């Protein structure tokens, strides 16, 4: 699955640089002992089926725009015929920010975030886009800069919820697919060419 990893979008060459502030499982932390490259570490996590750790790692490794795109792709795949129209519109706004990551596009997301429940993959994908700016305050006069990797937490929420909302027998398959998409994005792809 990960034979052709060539991270063009991830700046850190070694996994330790990315993992310093991630809450990984004990098994995943043990794999850092030999100072693996980012690509080798991610491949090992996937091979050993430490999928949640792999999601955490990739969400923190990807830049804001690419990570948000990954979250949006995963959220779209979790949609059903019952997905509310406001969630569909919210992801479209988040994707508009990905296509053109301007402050004007990001601010358009704010009103719809107030309608979301934060119990769905879509809501977290949208928050990833909103938390990717320099100011996460809902009030124009009060500037609140987000913590550096706040967007990654939203991406993690989107990917994990997308992977686990189906029946248990599909969860690992979903993780593998979503991680392939994330790797494709990290390699400079659009994540859509993976099946």
Image (tube, helix red, strand yellow):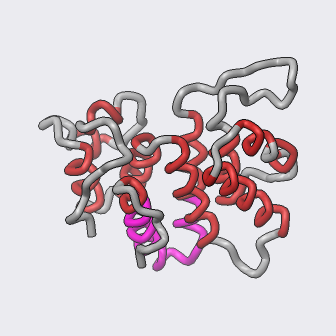
The magenta-colored residue range is 160-182
Q: Nearer the viewer, residue 12 or 54?
A: 12
Image point 82% across, 18% down: which residue? 142
Asked where in the image residue 85 lies, by quadrant, the reply is bottom right
Q: Residue furthest top?
A: 142
Asked where in the image residue 73 lies, by quadrant, the reply is bottom right
Q: Is residue 163 above or below residue 115?
A: below
Q: Is residue 182 above or below residue 63?
A: below
Q: Is residue 17 left or right of residue 159?
A: left
Q: Is residue 67 left or right of residue 43?
A: right
Percent x, y of residue 160: 53, 58
Could you tell me which quadrant the N terminus lies in?
bottom left
Q: Is residue 100 above or below residue 138?
A: below
Q: Nearer the viewer, residue 136 or 169?
A: 136
Image point 12% across, 37% down: which residue? 34
Percent x, y of residue 9: 38, 47
Image point 22% across, 55% down: which residue? 44
**Residue 189 belongs to the span the image colors magenta:** no
Q: Residue furthest left?
A: 34
The prevailing secondary structure element of the residues shown in magenta is helix
Image point 43% across, 45% down: which residue? 62
Asked where in the image residue 164 lies, by quadrant, the reply is bottom right
**Residue 165 belongs to the span the image colors magenta:** yes
Q: Is residue 53 above or below residue 142?
A: below
């Amino acid at each position: 699955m990960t034979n052709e990893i060539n991270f063009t979008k991830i700046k850190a060459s070694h996994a330790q640089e990315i993992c310093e502030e991630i809450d990984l499982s004990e098994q995943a932390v043990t794999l850092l002992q030999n100072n693996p490259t980012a690509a080798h570490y991610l491949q090992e996590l996937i091979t050993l089926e430490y999928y949640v750790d792999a999601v955490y790692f990739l969400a923190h490794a990807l830049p804001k725009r690419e990570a948000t795109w990954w979250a949006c792709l995963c959220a779209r795949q979790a949609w059903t015929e019952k997905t509310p129209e406001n969630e569909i519109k919210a992801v479209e706004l988040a994707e508009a920010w990905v296509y053109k990551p301007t402050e004007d596009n990001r601010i358009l997301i704010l009103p719809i975030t107030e309608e979301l429940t934060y119990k769905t993959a879509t809501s977290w994908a949208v928050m990833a886009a909103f938390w990717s700016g320099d100011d996460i305050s809902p009030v124009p006069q009060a500037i609140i800069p987000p913590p550096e990797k706040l967007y990654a937490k939203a991406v993690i929420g989107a990917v994990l919820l997308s992977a686990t909302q189906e029946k248990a027998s599909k969860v690992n398959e979903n993780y593998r697919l979503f991680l392939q998409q994330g790797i494709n994005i990290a390699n400079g792809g659009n994540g859509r060419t993976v099946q």
